[in-house]
Image: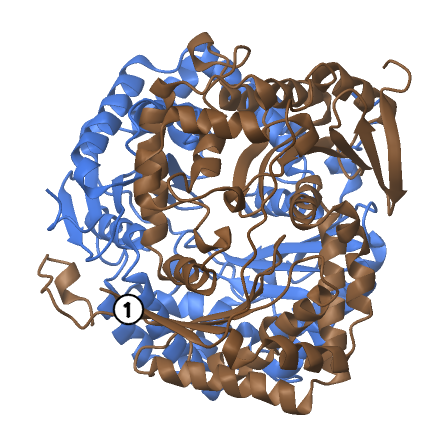
Chain colours: A blue, B brown
């Protein structure tokens, strides 16, 4: 309604970028409305690149980067960053087997502090043994804590059933993970870092109240002498054929149970069908309030507080899952209604109204999500990580608008076979009548 | 807009506060052109604080029913609130807490009319049908059950139930299970008719808008709604001083114990609130914080969370920690007590204070990165005090000195005001022999 609504130049024009000789790609967008900056980035050193029996080396290596560098101890780094309200993080988990996520934020007066810490941590981590020992103890406790969570127990058991051991999306049982954690030492992390970290797969995005050329110069000067490192290839694992099965994981003393319906889906984020599948899924089950599953299982039947469906598509094709929480006695009714809705959705497809609403929703939400430095940084980072380029942000609304009902229905039905689900429940069923 | 429909009450730090003269609706505007996006929110001054035995959880259940239908936005007509908002790409929800209920939508700024129409419609015209309550009750009951799955939620609910005996902070916002199940639709309707009125609400608009256009639109949608026919009932129950330490234990099956220590403190408006916020940061704000160093870095706890609760009435200062398996929960309690005693005896350093002040001030700056974050912070401020409390917060934080921190520890964090809670895993009792579950370490 504003006559002076902020006009944004196309991202393809506004984002300044530089590619260094060692392969590092740097992107900066000036957005001067608030004196802050957001940092987002990635490199390819996720669990896909770790030995199949010790995938967790990848997440531990990412997590331990901040535990000390050749210049600063963990505590000194934390004091320098926390003292200025800046934050910096590195993480990698099974939800994206390929990447390591970099994230950070700072007041713009502290941009140099944040960028310098980022480069120092990337280039000279030392993985102190005493820090790893502490982290191993904490992690063993955290894994045990997860064993109490019905959502995690159901999801992990489902992944064990639909993916073979050795697949990057396979999840080991809690006690197996604990044994693997306990067997690690710092040389494992150091070796993984040496083999898999380097500039060639690094992409960094900075958005906020900064001078773009200055940020690019500073990052270039700090990163240009970093080793290029490996050029990680994407040896995507086979998508296994679905073998339907079911399992109940008994977790005592839980008032609510979690049910996960899962199948391996042949869909990566870079697949030309991704947007079509994603729109179809929105109509089926993205929202507990408005999608078909939500309207039936939550709104009409009152069986759950939350029901969601979705593809887990990254560079690797992940599962399609429906997750629902229920009072244990209501599990069978919730599963039956869920499968019934999925069947009729796959058989009949979306209505024209659903497609129109999902499109306008996606395009509107896209504007809303770009309403902050962190939101813009995340969107740019994803577009670059998946090889779409900066212009993807400009083209996105048109890409959504172009999807047809036939395309969405066919793409979805090719990947989601209602009779192919593995159904895993976790909760307290013994006492339930 | 008809001339003089609004009275400008005050402006400060970019905020402008108006009152809609026809019905007393408080309107707060904060232009922020970070993107072509706006957040519209309505905060009602009603929360679980306004409930009593028999209808605990009513505020929250009512909030759920507010999505079910009005004459204009009704699922039966294909115009359900959530569907209409979803179709414009809004990020929306509603939440209930001790002191307030809020409804908000972040929208492309050209869709403001839709948000105003929805919030105006449900302010007085919610249908609140019994056929909607029945399935929604089980939805909310599942939300309650999900909370019961979480040791942290169980611990904090029990902490409030123990520390507050007379004041309604005693019961959780979600309510007690049997009240959720038993409350009648007529009781919810009565609650709605008592508290949902323009003169018990604040509407806020943050983001990309023109002030005159926005005020005109707000008047168009809300101006005809009459004020409440009767005064809004006020809570008069006061929790008396605590006169000795209280303890509780919850035992359930599980893997990890939790320990919580909570002291009775002050209401958000109290001058010591910023001091307690600084203390909270010094004890629990990041890796460098004292309790992180004493508990997590010493491998006693898996993490530690410090919460200086800021509520309308006197609240708590809490420390919660999941205990690393193999460590006695009593060790956590002892260390927390030692660290509190150390602040009482030796105060804190100026450097610690400066770090805390910087971090808390920065949070306010980071809020302004997005319209929904400002709206969220502002909603809490309005619920526990008023918007100026939010606007003045950074200055109040800036004035906190180490001696203040030591003083509030001496004044509030003493044993007579303390509630200690333990969540203990039951010894492996009933055998669990499913293929997967039975083989987990215990």
Report the residue at 80% width, 33% height from top: A9
Q: Is residue A55 left or right of residue B280?
A: left
Q: Is residue A239 left or right of residue B82?
A: left
Report the residue at 23% width, 32% height from top: A334
Percent x, y of residue B24:
75, 27
Camera sees residue B298 = no
The residue singled out by tag 1 in the image is A177
Q: Which of B397 and A113 lies nearest the eye of the viewer?
A: B397
**Label 1: chain letter:** A
Q: Which of B223 and B323 lies nearest the eye of the viewer?
A: B223
SS at circle 1: helix
Percent x, y of residue B124:
59, 20
Q: Total marks drawn? A: 1
Q: Residue furthest bottom?
A: B346
Quarter location, residue B330: bottom left
Q: Is residue B59 above or below residue B355?
A: above
Quarter of the image for the N terminus of chain B: give it. Answer: top right
Q: Which of B7 and B373 lies nearest the eye of the viewer?
A: B7
Quarter location, residue A186: bottom left
Percent x, y of residue B186:
41, 24
Quarter of the image for the C terminus of chain B: give it. Answer: bottom left
Q: Residue furthest right?
A: B3
Percent x, y of residue A58:
42, 66
Report the residue at 58% width, 31% height from top: B195
């Amino acid at each position: 309604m504003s006559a002076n609504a902020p006009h944004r130049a196309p991202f393809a024009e506004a984002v300044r970028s530089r590619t260094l000789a060692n392969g590092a790609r740097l992107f900066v967008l000036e957005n001067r409305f608030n004196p802050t900056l957001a940092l987002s980035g990635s490199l390819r050193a996720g669990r896909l690149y770790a030995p199949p029996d010790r995938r967790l080396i990848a997440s531990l290596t990412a997590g331990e980067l901040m535990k000390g560098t050749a210049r600063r101890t963990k505590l000194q780094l934390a004091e320098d960053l926390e003292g200025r309200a800046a934050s910096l993080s590195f993480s990698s988990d099974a939800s994206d087997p390929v990447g390591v996520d970099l994230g950070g934020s700072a007041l713009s007066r502290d941009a140099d502090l944040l960028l310098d810490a980022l480069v120092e941590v990337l280039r000279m981590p030392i993985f102190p043994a005493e820090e790893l020992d502490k982290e191993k103890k904490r992690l063993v406790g955290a894994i045990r804590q997860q064993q109490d969570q019905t959502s995690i127990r159901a999801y992990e058991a489902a992944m064990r059933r639909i993916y073979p051991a050795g697949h990057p999306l396979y999840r080991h049982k809690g006690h197996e993970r604990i044994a693997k954690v306990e067997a690690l030492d710092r040389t494992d992390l150091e070796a993984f870092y040496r083999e898999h970290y380097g500039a060639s797969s690094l992409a960094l995005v900075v958005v906020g109240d900064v001078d773009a050329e200055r940020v690019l110069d500073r990052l270039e000067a700090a990163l240009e002498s970093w080793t290029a490192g490996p050029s990680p290839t994407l040896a995507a694992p086979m998508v296994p054929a679905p073998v339907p099965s079911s399992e109940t994981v008994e977790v005592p003393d839980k008032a609510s149970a979690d049910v996960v319906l899962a199948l391996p889906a042949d869909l990566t984020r870079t697949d030309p069908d991704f947007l079509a599948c994603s729109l179809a899924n929105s109509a089926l089950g993205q929202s507990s309030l408005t999608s078909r599953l939500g309207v039936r299982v939550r709104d009409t039947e009152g069986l759950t507080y939350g029901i969601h469906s979705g593809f887990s598509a990254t560079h690797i094709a992940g599962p399609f899952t429906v997750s629902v929480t229920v009072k244990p006695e209501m599990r069978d009714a919730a599963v039956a209604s869920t499968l019934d809705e999925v069947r009729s959705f796959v058989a009949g497809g979306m209505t024209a109204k659903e497609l129109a609403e999902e499109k306008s929703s996606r395009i509107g939400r896209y504007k809303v999500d770009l309403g902050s430095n962190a939101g813009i940084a995340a969107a740019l980072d994803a577009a670059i990580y998946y090889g779409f380029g900066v212009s993807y942000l400009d083209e996105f609304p048109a890409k959504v608008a172009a999807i047809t009902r036939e395309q969405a229905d066919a793409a979805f039905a090719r990947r989601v076979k209602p009779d192919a689900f593995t159904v895993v429940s976790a909760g307290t069923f013994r006492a339930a009548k | 807009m008809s001339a003089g429909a609004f009275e400008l009450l005050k402006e400060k730090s970019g905020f402008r506060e108006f009152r809609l003269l026809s019905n007393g609706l408080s309107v707060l505007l904060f232009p922020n052109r970070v993107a072509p996006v706006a957040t519209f929110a309505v905060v009602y001054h009603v929360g679980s604080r306004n409930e009593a035995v028999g209808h605990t959880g009513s505020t929250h259940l009512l909030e759920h029913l507010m999505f079910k239908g009005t004459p204009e936005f009704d699922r039966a007509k294909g115009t359900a609130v959530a569907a209409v908002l979803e179709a414009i790409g809004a990020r929306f929800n509603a939440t209930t807490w001790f002191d307030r209920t809020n409804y908000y939508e972040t929208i492309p700024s050209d869709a403001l009319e839709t948000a105003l129409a929805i919030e105006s419609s449900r302010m007085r015209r919610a249908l609140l049908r019994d056929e909607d309550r029945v399935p929604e009750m089980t939805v909310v009951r599942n939300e309650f059950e999900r909370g019961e799955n979480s040791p942290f939620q169980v611990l904090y609910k029990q902490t409030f139930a123990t520390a507050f005996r007379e004041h309604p902070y005693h019961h959780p916002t979600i309510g007690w299970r049997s009240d959720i199940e038993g409350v009648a639709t007529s009781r919810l309707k009565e609650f709605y008719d008592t508290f949902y009125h323009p003169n018990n609400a604040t509407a806020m608009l943050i983001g990309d808008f023109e002030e005159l256009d926005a005020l005109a639109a707000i008047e168009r949608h809300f101006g005809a709604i009459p004020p409440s026919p009767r005064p809004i009932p006020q809570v008069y129950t006061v929790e008396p001083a605590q006169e000795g330490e209280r303890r509780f234990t919850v035992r359930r099956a599980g893997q990890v114990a939790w320990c919580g220590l909570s002291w009775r403190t002050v209401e958000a408006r109290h001058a010591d609130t910023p001091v307690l916020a600084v203390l909270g940061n010094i004890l629990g704000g990041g890796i460098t914080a004292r309790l992180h160093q004493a508990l997590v870095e010493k491998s006693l706890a898996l993490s530690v969370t410090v919460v200086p609760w800021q509520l309308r009435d006197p609240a708590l200062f809490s420390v919660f920690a999941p205990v690393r398996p193999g460590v006695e929960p009593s060790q956590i309690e002892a260390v927390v007590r030692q660290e509190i005693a150390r602040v009482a005896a030796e105060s804190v350093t100026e450097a610690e204070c400066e770090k805390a002040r910087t971090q808390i001030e920065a949070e306010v700056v980071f809020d302004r990165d997005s319209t929904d974050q400002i709206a969220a912070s502002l909603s809490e401020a309005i619920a526990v005090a008023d918007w100026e409390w939010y606007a003045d917060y950074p200055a109040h934080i800036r004035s906190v000195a180490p001696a203040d921190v030591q003083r509030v520890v001496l004044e509030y964090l003493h044993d007579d005001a303390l509630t200690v809670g333990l969540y203990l895993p039951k010894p492996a009792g009933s055998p669990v022999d499913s293929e997967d579950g039975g083989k987990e370490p215990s």
